[in-house]
Image (spheres, rainbow, N blue to C red):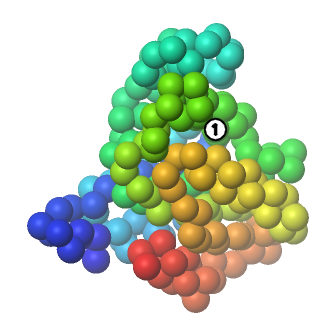
Amino acid sequence: MCYNFIGDEMKNLMIINSSPRKEGVCAQLITQVKPYFAECSIKQYNLYDLSPAPCTACGFCELHEGCSNKDLDIFFEDFEDADYIIFFTPIYNNFFPAPLKAVIDRFQRYYSARFCRGKKPPVEKPKRVGMVIASGSNARQCADYMTSTLKQSFTVLNGEICARYYIPGTDTGKYTFNIIELEKFIHQMKK
């Protein structure tokens, strides 16, 4: 159930898909996860469609709220309003695909809010964050590194990485969707 105990307010789930494949493994996993959040308001972003600009370290966010580049303004409104955020990502060259890396770099607006402008916390609403990672081979060490990277980011973003679901072997087609692991992931997200 995705209702808050105070006033039965509907909770918000933000799905961030960083795969370019419209019908790939990440898309299949999103289809599997969504029904578990049927009681939530769901916003879904496909980062290859969004095509986020990279952070240029221009310094705007050190003095002002937001970013000088306005391409992610609505995305970040939804980000701030989310109760749950789930990243669906393949592993590319041992790390996140470029559009997701660009979004992580654009979190700079919140780091500057916290450390340059003294806003505590820079993101008011706490978040439970999950990662669903797919890799062509067995790249568990890379998945661990990616998870650590997001954990570090969310210490400033008022979020907790509380769940991860990892699917290796997608290049050979020798992967399986493990319903027990999926339900464990959902349980950890909703604790």
Q: Position of residue 153 (x, y in %)?
A: 64, 47
Question: Which one is nearer the viewer's eye here, 115 or 97?
Answer: 115
Q: Position of residue 164 (x, y in %)?
A: 63, 69
Residue 93's quadrant in the figure?
A: top right
Question: Which one is nearer the viewer's eye here, 135 or 78?
Answer: 78
As helix, strand or loop, the secondary structure at mark 1 comes to helix
Q: Is residue 175 above or below residue 114?
A: below
Left or right of residue 49: residue 77: left
Q: Position of residue 82 (x, y in %)?
A: 37, 51
Q: For the point 61% across and 83% down, which residue is it?
A: 181
Q: Amino acid at mark 1?
A: Ile
Residue lying at the far left in this picture: please name it.
Answer: 7
Left or right of residue 119: residue 185: right
Question: Which one is nearer the viewer's eye here, 146 or 23?
Answer: 146
Q: Is residue 92 visible?
A: yes
Query: Which quadrant, please, contains the C terminus?
Result: bottom left
Q: Is residue 144 above or below residue 98?
A: below
Q: Is residue 67 above or below residue 176?
A: above
Residue lying at the far bottom in this picture: please name it.
Answer: 180
Q: How many marks?
A: 1
Q: Identify residue for label 1.
A: 104
Query: Which quadrant, please, contains the N terminus?
Result: bottom left
Q: For the point 21% across and 74% down, which residue is it?
A: 5
Question: Which one is nearer the viewer's eye here, 182 or 76?
Answer: 76
Q: Is residue 164 above or below residue 64?
A: below
Question: Mark 1: few, some, or many residues within 10 Å (few <14, many ≥20)?
Answer: some
Q: Is residue 28 visible?
A: no
Q: For the point 64% across and 71% down, which residue is it?
A: 165
Q: Position of residue 112 (x, y in %)?
A: 57, 27
